[in-house]
Image (cartoon, rainbow, N blue to C red):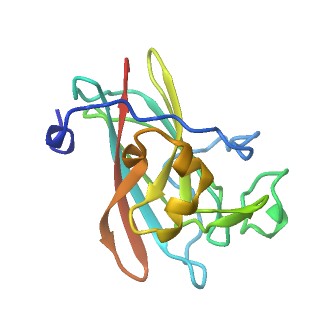
């Protein structure tokens, strides 16, 4: 059992829509790095997104697949159906995949995504996450704690137990944002 999971009784993390920009072709070398560039693009911040996956009994879940995908800092997805996908930096894969370690932990390195206009609404900054366990799959979205636009986001408002979809800020400065999030699966 991890320290973060000991702070409150476990309740399952709510699911949200997969979204239209789940990668149709995943990179063969997908790993924890969604940004493969050597220098941070002008105006962008690096993102360190870490977390853990536990079950309802707050037991760590090892060996699960965690997928992460999101928009680039300008709110564009590297997806053929996404608007302005041709303007996404080729070093931004926008997709990563890892397995949880023996203590249910995972970590990704990327760039902080931007919000974007979706039909008549503005989407808050968010990360798409899919966790594939032995008995279930969770598809959801994770939001930033200090993003004031979150409360206006249609999908955030539609979620039950939305507090489970907010990542905790561990460290933030002008160059790096480090977020931590705990996902709770019902059956693992």
Nearer to us in this view, 105 or 17: 17
| Residue that appears at 36% across and 80% down | 173
State which quarter of the image contains the N terminus: top left
66 is higher (above) or lower (below) than 133: below
Name which quarter of the figure residue 83 lies in: bottom right
Decide which of 121, 69 is in the foreground and name it: 121
Q: Is residue 118 above or below residue 62?
A: below
Residue 174: x, y in percent?
42, 83
Relative to residue 57, is residue 81 drawn left or right? right
Left or right of 1 in this view: 111: right
Q: Check the image and report above or below for 130 versus 123.
A: above
Tell me where residue 73 appears, x and y as whole percent: 61, 71
The residue closer to the viewer here, 33 or 54, is 54
Q: How many numbered marks have been drawn onto this rendered protein structure?
A: 0
Q: Nearer the viewer, residue 71 or 33?
A: 71
Position in image of residue 16 (x %, y %)? 56, 38
- For image coordinates 53% across by 50% down, the residue present is 156
**Quarter occupied by residue 88:** bottom right
Q: Quadrant of the C terminus?
A: top left
Question: Looking at the picture, how far across and down is residue 162, in whole percent?
Answer: 43, 46
Residue at position x 40%, y 40% in the image: 161
């Amino acid at each position: 059992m991890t320290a973060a999971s000991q702070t409150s009784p476990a309740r399952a993390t709510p699911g949200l829509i997969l979204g239209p920009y789940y990668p149709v072709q995943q990179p063969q070398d997908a790993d924890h790095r969604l940004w493969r560039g050597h220098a941070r693009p002008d105006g962008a911040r690096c993102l360190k997104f870490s977390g853990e996956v536990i079950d309802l009994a707050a037991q760590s879940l090892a060996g699960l697949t965690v997928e992460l995908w999101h928009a680039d800092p300008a709110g564009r997805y590297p997806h053929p159906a996404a608007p302005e996908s041709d303007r996404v930096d080729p070093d931004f894969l926008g997709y990563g995949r890892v397995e949880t370690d023996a203590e249910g932990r995972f970590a990704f390195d990327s760039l902080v995504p931007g919000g974007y206009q979706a039909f008549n609404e503005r989407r808050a900054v968010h990360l798409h996450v899919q966790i594939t366990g032995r008995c279930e799959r969770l598809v959801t979205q994770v939001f930033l704690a200090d993003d004031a636009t979150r409360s206006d986001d249609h999908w955030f408002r539609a979620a039950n137990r939305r507090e489970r979809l907010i990542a905790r800020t561990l460290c933030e400065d002008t160059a790096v944002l480090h977020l931590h999030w705990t996902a709770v699966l019902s059956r693992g």
